[in-house]
């Protein structure tokens, strides 16, 4: 066994790292951030008329503001990533043993904080009133503490009524990955029994349900649950029991889908509730539900019209008024239109290289906690990339998931970098040992 | 198992579970526990395996996604690209091109276009505007305006807007059959003004959503003039018949477009690609000559009113310039109105007798008639009936036509009539040319040297060729005064037995060698519908003794008018066979000449000397006392020509009492400038066999009388008092006559002789 490990380590030698930090992941993430800046700006730059004041000093257009904000978050993210990567959390035990033991190592803290975000939203919704915000434009509701768009409460304002807000679902993803990694590190053996698995799924299901119910964000809910579920599979003790669980969950998911489709099939488009059912129907029968399937159709037009090398950066036609959320969920379609098939496959392969490095770290680390964190982050990035690309190419029904690191959105970028920081931290500790 | 046991088991299970869960949670929280569980190594390798399996799934998922993207780009790329561009365009209006006009040689407009407007309703605009303003009155205002100014149904418009709020382009000006039509500019104008006024007005509701799309409609200012030459235009600028069809590609232009699209900065940009108008045609045809020709044709057809409906089946006239092959006029009676070509109906153009003939022909082709009867009969407008032979009684039974048969007959008739009227008789119909072809035989004989002109032939009225008897038009022979006829006299008198002899002398091979250049092939005139008659003339195999005999005086084979006039033109202009041209120039929309059609000599048919002799002979036909064409001489001019009366071949041989009469002529005689060919198909007169040919002569004379002065050809002959008076009545300017006194005297006698002696002159 020891010999095997030595061989693995030898194989790892040629890969680039600096002070134990894996530079492949760092540079790939930087490269993706470059894509982010270019295409977020490209997607919004054609809007000239909208002037805003930044920090009460500079007058800029809204697209420039978006560019500056994104740049700020990317810088913040990179710094956070490097800090987290190089920080040795275990050393804290030496300085502040009690805090380390009862707070930092305590998954309950992370778990409860996660849940409290959504309970906060739910409370503010009822306290402050939640009228408006059913359109695409974000509206401050709940005494200005939360923001609502498309009927979903996805943002919490840092200061009430300010423009600065964050998306709790992005924060929660990170917190829950850490919380469950610690849980599995401490009590992974519970998965030996079916009732243990049931307990795990219950604990994992609560925040997922909160995201869905309080924030009306099905896609985040699914991603969170799926990430935690994958972590469970990896930590699983018994293949058969794990397989059985997968089957049961898969069956349940299928039944839910059927329950959404069957009663709504044949109804006119505007009468279908909830909107998830509409989207699933529009995915299966795009021609019968043109209004709902339009976003995906436009995205596919964008991808198809790019050709091999695209229209050139900034030359997309679809981004103008036709492709909604071009800087966000649909950014992959924009990349494909402006850089063509080449650009699309380049982005996919960059993600793949990143995931490959994570996979290697996950395989090589001996620490249960590190492995679980890396697997969680991998699952998070992998799922989000795949689901996003599947949505724009109509393999999946439409859900609003950002493309990690590339889509605009401060919280998403910042916390994705922090997650990468944890991965790098885990990678660094392989060598350190 | 008792209830207690079950209860006990359940309770135990629940307790166990709770205890287990508590232990788990305790461990999870990690307070008081610092160790990991289980066998580390084993666990680790198991997890690595699971991670690998999951990563394998991830690889597969990435491949699937990549494949999907590649598929979208490679398979649907073009289609999606089009979709992207098409949804970019907010408005897309076609700017129609203007089809080229047709002018005559003097610039008179024969075919042109007028601008009309198609009314387009933009329901989207008006609905949006009404929504914005929150006032549905705007929709009503639009419907009201359409109702008040153009007579649209108000309710229908309101209903349409309510049902199609997203439709931004609907052509609403339609006829009863739902076909989109354009409306005259004058009718549109009040509505345009009302719209402009309502938008500027502070009180009235603005009228939105009505647009006008340009459209051109073909008009023919001279309606029937040169109808067979010009042809008409179907919907969608598709030329039918004549020049419109032949030059369709040249006359048509390319549509332009006006489209708006949203540019990179979300501004609406409007781009206009102008239409390219079609080229115009400048004809060789002179509208004045054409008008004279058509007037005279109508005049003579109206005078031929022996029975039923006046007129001939067809009357064709071609006037051609001798030294260029340019067509100056070409007319084929009956005429139709180019502005309304579909108004051609059977009773307007055909007599009852003709209709019955056509119907009977149809019945024969369909096989409805099998007995004694060869006709469909009418009794005062009742259902037509057939007589069918009853084999038992040996008599004819009367059979009424069934509904189905009637419909079939109707369809065929209207098609037949339309086609018959629309087509150009001068190039599309074949007939046996008759005696006019004797000029060809003469020229062949002279040019090949087989005939010298000094032949002596004594005509006693008929000649036997194998089993056929060929008769002279003079019942007792045309050599009545005892002198044998030479070649010139034979042509002048149009003697068939003499030409039978001449044909024999010329021989089959020489005859074919010459005639294959002269007729039986297309002349390549620039009109649609020319037929070649290639299979209707004789060749080496079919030209035997009898056929050679009949061919030499123009019977047995078929030609078209245009072939005959081109051939004849070459015989009298020094042997040059010109390609006939209707179009002289093609000009673009700015009036610049694109193509200049130059005269084109296709071949040399006979020598110059033969040609000179031919002119002399042909003058004789008109001027000799015994000539057949004396009636054709116009006042003040000398012309040459040749008459023709031909039998019509049909089912069962030559048709009794049906003739095609013709007159081929050139003028002025000394220096031919124009050649004219007049053909009257079955003139409606009492005795077609003897009296008909004078109709073609009279028509020739009438046309020349007005056309020659129009062409500024000076008169060379003295006018008699009567002629002078006639010309003055017609308003023809006669003062430019230069007359030599002596000549005047002689000519005067000749013309008097003509009047007195050869008035009974007739021919086969």
Image (cartoon, rainbow, N blue to C red):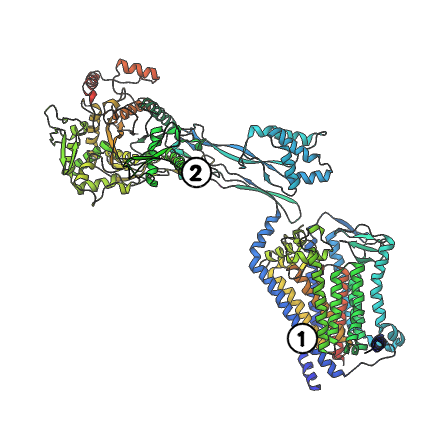
Relative to B585, say whether A346 is above or below. below
Magenta-tinted stretch: B247-254
- Residue positioned 65% across, 34% down in the render: B142
Relative to B473, say whether A211 is above or below. below
The kind of secondary structure element at disc 1 is: helix
Distance from label 1 to label 2 (Cα)? 73 Å
The kind of secondary structure element at disc 2 is: strand
Is there a contact, CB below 8 Å, between mark 1 and mark 2? no
> Looking at the figure, which quarter contains the N terminus of chain B?
bottom right
* Residue receiving disc 2: B239
- Left or right? Give the position of B217 relative to B742: right
**Residue closest to the far left:** B482
- Left or right? Give the position of A330 relative to A174: left
- Residue positioned 49% across, 41% down in the render: B254
> Looking at the figure, which quarter contains the C terminus of chain B?
top left
Q: Which badge, 1 or 2, is on the more N-terminal residue?
A: 1
């Amino acid at each position: 066994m020891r010999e095997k490990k030595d061989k693995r380590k030898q194989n790892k030698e040629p890969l680039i790292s600096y002070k134990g930090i894996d530079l492949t992941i760092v540079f790939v993430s930087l490269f993706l951030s470059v894509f982010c800046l270019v295409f977020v700006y490209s997607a919004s730059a054609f809007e000239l008329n909208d002037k805003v004041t930044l920090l009460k000093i500079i007058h800029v257009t809204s697209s420039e503001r978006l560019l500056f904000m994104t740049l700020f978050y990317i810088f913040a993210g990179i710094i956070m990533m490097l800090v987290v990567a190089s920080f040795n959390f275990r050393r804290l035990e030496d300085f502040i043993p009690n805090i380390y033991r009862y707070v930092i190592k305590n998954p309950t803290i992370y778990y409860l904080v996660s849940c409290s975000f959504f309970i906060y939203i739910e409370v503010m919704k009822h306290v402050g009133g939640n009228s408006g915000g059913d359109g695409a434009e974000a509206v401050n509701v709940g005494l200005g503490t939360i923001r609502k768009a498309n009927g979903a409460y996805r943002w919490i304002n840092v200061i009430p009524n300010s423009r600065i807000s964050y998306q709790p679902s992005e924060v929660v993803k990170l917190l829950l990955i850490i919380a469950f990694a610690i849980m599995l590190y401490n009590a992974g053996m519970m998965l030996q029994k079916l009732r243990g698995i049931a307990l795990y799924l219950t604990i994992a299901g609560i925040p997922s349900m909160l995201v869905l119910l309080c924030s009306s964000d099905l896609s985040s809910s699914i991603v969170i649950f799926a990430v935690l579920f994958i972590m469970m599979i990896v930590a699983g003790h018994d293949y058969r029991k794990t397989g059985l669980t997968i089957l049961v969950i898969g069956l349940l998911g299928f039944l839910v889908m059927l329950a959404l489709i069957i009663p709504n099939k044949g109804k006119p488009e505007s009468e279908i509730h909830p909107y998830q059912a509409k989207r699933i129907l529009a995915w299966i029968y795009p021609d019968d539900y043109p209004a709902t399937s339009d976003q995906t159709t436009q995205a596919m037009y964008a991808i198809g019209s790019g050709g091999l090398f695209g229209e050139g950066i900034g030359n997309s036609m679809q981004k103008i008024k036709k492709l909604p959320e071009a800087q966000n969920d649909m950014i992959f379609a924009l990349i494909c239109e402006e850089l063509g098939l080449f650009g699309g496959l380049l982005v996919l392969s960059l993600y793949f290289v990143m995931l490959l490095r994570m996979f290697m770290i996950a395989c090589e680390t001996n620490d249960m906690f590190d492995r679980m964190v890396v697997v969680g982050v991998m699952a998070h990035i992998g799922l989000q990339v795949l689901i996003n690309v599947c949505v724009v190419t109509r393999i999946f029904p439409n859900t609003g998931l950002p493309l990690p690191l590339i889509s605009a959105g401060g919280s998403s970028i910042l916390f994705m970098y922090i997650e990468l920081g944890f991965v790098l931290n885990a990678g660094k500790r392989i060598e350190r040992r | 198992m008792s209830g207690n046991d079950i209860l006990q088991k359940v309770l135990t299970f629940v307790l166990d579970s709770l205890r287990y869960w508590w232990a788990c949670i305790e461990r999870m929280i990690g307070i008081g526990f610092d160790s990991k569980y289980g066998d580390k190594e084993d666990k680790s390798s198991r997890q690595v395996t699971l991670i690998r399996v999951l990563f394998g799934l991830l690889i597969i998922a990435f491949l699937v996604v990549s494949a999907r993207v590649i598929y979208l780009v490679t398979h649907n790329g073009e289609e999606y690209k089009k979709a992207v561009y098409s949804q970019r365009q907010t408005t897309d209006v076609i700017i129609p091109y203007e089809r080229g006009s047709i002018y005559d040689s003097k610039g008179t407009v024969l075919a042109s276009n007028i601008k009309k407007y198609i009314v387009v309703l933009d329901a989207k605009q008006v609905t949006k505007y009404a929504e914005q303003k929150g006032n549905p009155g705007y929709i009503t205002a639009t419907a009201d305006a359409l109702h008040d100014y153009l007579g649209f149904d108000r309710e229908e418009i309101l209903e349409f807007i309510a049902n199609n709020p997203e439709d931004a382009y609907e052509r609403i000006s339609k006829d009863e059959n739902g076909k989109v039509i354009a409306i005259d500019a004058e009718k549109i104008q009040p509505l345009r003004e009302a719209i402009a006024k309502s938008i500027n007005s502070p009180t009235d509701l603005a009228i939105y959503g009505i647009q006008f799309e340009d459209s051109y409609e073909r008009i023919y200012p001279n309606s029937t003039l040169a109808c067979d030459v010009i042809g008409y235009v179907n919907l969608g600028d598709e030329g039918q018949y004549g020049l419109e069809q032949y030059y369709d590609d040249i006359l048509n232009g390319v549509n332009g477009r006006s489209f708006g699209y949203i540019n990179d900065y979300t501004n609406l940009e409007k781009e206009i690609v102008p239409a390219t108008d079609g080229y115009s045609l400048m004809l060789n045809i002179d509208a004045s000559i054409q008008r004279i020709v058509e007037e005279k044709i109508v005049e003579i057809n109206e005078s031929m009113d022996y029975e039923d409906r006046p007129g001939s089946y067809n009357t064709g006239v071609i006037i051609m310039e001798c030294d260029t092959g340019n067509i100056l006029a070409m007319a084929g009676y009956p005429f139709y109105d180019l502005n309304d070509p579909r108004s051609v109906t059977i009773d307007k153009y055909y007599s009852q007798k003709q209709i019955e003939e056509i119907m009977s022909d149809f019945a024969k082709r369909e096989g409805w008639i099998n007995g004694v009867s060869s006709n469909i009969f009418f009794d005062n407008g009742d259902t037509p009936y057939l007589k069918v032979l009853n084999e038992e009684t040996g008599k004819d039974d009367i059979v009424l036509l069934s509904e189905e048969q009637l419909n079939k007959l109707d369809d065929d008739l209207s098609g037949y009539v339309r086609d018959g009227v629309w087509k150009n008789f001068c190039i599309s119909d074949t007939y046996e040319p008759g005696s006019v072809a004797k000029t060809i035989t003469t020229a062949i004989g002279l040019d090949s040297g087989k005939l010298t002109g000094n032949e002596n032939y004594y005509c006693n009225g008929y000649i036997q060729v194998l089993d056929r008897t060929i008769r002279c038009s003079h019942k007792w022979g045309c050599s009545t005064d005892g002198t044998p006829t030479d070649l010139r006299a034979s042509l002048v008198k149009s003697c068939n037995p003499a030409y039978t002899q001449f044909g024999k002398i010329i021989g089959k091979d020489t005859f074919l060698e010459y005639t294959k250049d002269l007729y039986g092939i297309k002349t390549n005139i620039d009109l649609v519908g020319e037929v070649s008659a290639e299979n209707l003339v004789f060749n080496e195999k079919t030209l035997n003794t009898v056929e050679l005999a009949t061919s030499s005086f123009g019977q047995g084979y078929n030609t078209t008018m245009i072939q005959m006039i081109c051939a004849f033109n070459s015989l009298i202009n020094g042997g040059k066979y010109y390609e006939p041209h209707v179009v002289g120039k093609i000009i673009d929309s700015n009036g610049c000449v694109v193509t200049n059609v130059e005269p084109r000599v296709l071949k040399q048919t006979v020598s110059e000397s033969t040609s000179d002799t031919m002119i002399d002979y042909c003058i004789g036909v008109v001027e000799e006392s015994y000539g057949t064409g004396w009636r054709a001489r116009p006042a003040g001019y000398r012309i040459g020509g040749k008459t023709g009366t031909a039998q019509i071949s049909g089912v069962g041989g030559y048709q009794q009492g049906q003739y095609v009469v013709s007159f081929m002529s050139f003028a002025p005689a000394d220096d031919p400038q124009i050649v004219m060919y007049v053909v009257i198909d079955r003139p409606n007169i009492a005795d077609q066999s003897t009296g008909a040919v004078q109709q073609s002569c009279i028509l020739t004379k009438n046309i020349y009388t007005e056309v020659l002065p129009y062409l500024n050809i000076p008169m060379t002959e003295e006018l008699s008092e009567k002629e002078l008076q006639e010309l003055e009545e017609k308003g023809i300017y006669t003062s430019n006559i230069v007359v030599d006194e002596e000549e005047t005297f002689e000519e005067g006698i000749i013309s008097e002789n003509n009047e007195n002696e050869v008035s009974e002159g007739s021919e086969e």
